[in-house]
Image (cartoon, rainbow, N blue to C red):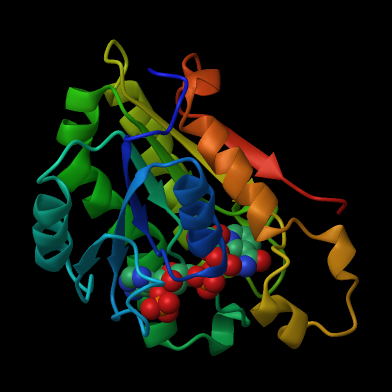
Amino acid sequence: MKDTWQGRRAVVVGAQGSVGQAICDALAQRGARIVAMVRRPYAETPAAPAEVVLSPLGDPDAVLAACREAARGPVDALFVASGAYAGGATAATPSETYLRLMWTNAGLPFFLLQGLLDPLQAAGGKAVLLGALAAEEPRAGQAAYAASKSALHSIVRSAARELQGTGARVNALLPAVIDSAENRRAMPQRDPTQWVSPKRLAELALALAGPLADDLQGALIPVRGAL
Ligand SMILES: NC(=O)c1ccc[n+]([C@@H]2O[C@H](COP(=O)([O-])OP(=O)(O)OC[C@H]3O[C@@H](n4cnc5c(N)ncnc54)[C@H](OP(=O)(O)O)[C@@H]3O)[C@@H](O)[C@H]2O)c1
């Protein structure tokens, strides 16, 4: 893989989230071609990447159709920064919440890989997914969330085995807590300097999609910040 992003084409899913946006910014600074896969239109055209795949991403058929659109050009990198969180005791978790988390954190990434692994392999590209440390170290009230991210981690490890012997790579970053506006609002009593910033996570994600990660396959990398 070339040691440059100039002209390389990267698909970013969840491109409007805190980490997805930071990944897009970092890619844009390096001259990459960005394909943003999003479920709602950008408010301002100048803020939107040149290529936008707009899809509800709500079921396998929609995801696979979006992947076909994204794969109209080479897929040198895939960043899956979409995800959802909900906490709550197992006894009190509504079935809709459980199913939404399982779809967003496991189903959507599974069908993204199903739709994009072939073009990634063709380009010798790298996929980087955002898991969660909470799946490895679940706390009370995180059963549904941790289960959904655990499923994602297993998907990454298994897909990595499938890719053995090819030039393509799939790895994941497992953040503890991200210093996002939403977390600052939700946890005003906590010290955000302990958390990892979206910008630093984006730099790690780009490193995992670059030549530094040529020998990595199926890695689940904890990103704790100062926690
Ligand atoms: N925040 C944390 O402390 C934390 C900790 C550990 C792991 N993570 C993981 O790290 C990643 C990035 O987190 P973040 O803070 O950037 O999250 P974020 O700001 O909430 O962004 C999440 C993105 O995912 C998209 N999304 C949510 N549900 C979706 C669905 N069903 N279909 C398609 N897109 C969907 C959202 O789209 P809309 O903009 O349209 O809503 C949004 O762009 C996520 O995978 C998250 O689970 C986060």
Of 24 and 152, the residue lying toward us: 24
- Residue 226 % position (x, y): 87, 51
Q: Quadrant of residue 104?
A: bottom left
Instruction: Tell me the quarter of the image containing the C terminus.
Output: bottom right
- Residue 89 % position (x, y): 63, 81
211 shown above or below 151 = above
Of 1 and 127, the residue lying toward us: 1
Q: Quadrant of residue 16?
A: bottom left
Left or right: where does residue 221 sit relative to residue 107? right
124 shown above or below 142 = above
Left or right: where does residue 215 sit relative to residue 137? left
Q: Farthest top residue?
A: 165
Left or right: where does residue 33 sit relative to residue 57? right
Q: Residue at x 73, y 85 (%)?
A: 186
Q: Residue at x 88, y 63 (%)?
A: 193
225 shown above or below 97 = above
Q: Quadrant of residue 50?
A: bottom left
Instruction: Tell me the quarter of the image containing the N terminus.
Output: top left
Q: Residue at x 32, y 35 (%)?
A: 7
Q: Is residue 147 visible?
A: no
116 shown above or below 57 = above
Left or right: where does residue 103 sit relative to residue 55? right
- Residue 2 % position (x, y): 40, 18
Q: Residue at x 46, y 55 (%)?
A: 24
Image label count: 0
Q: Is residue 19 visible?
A: yes
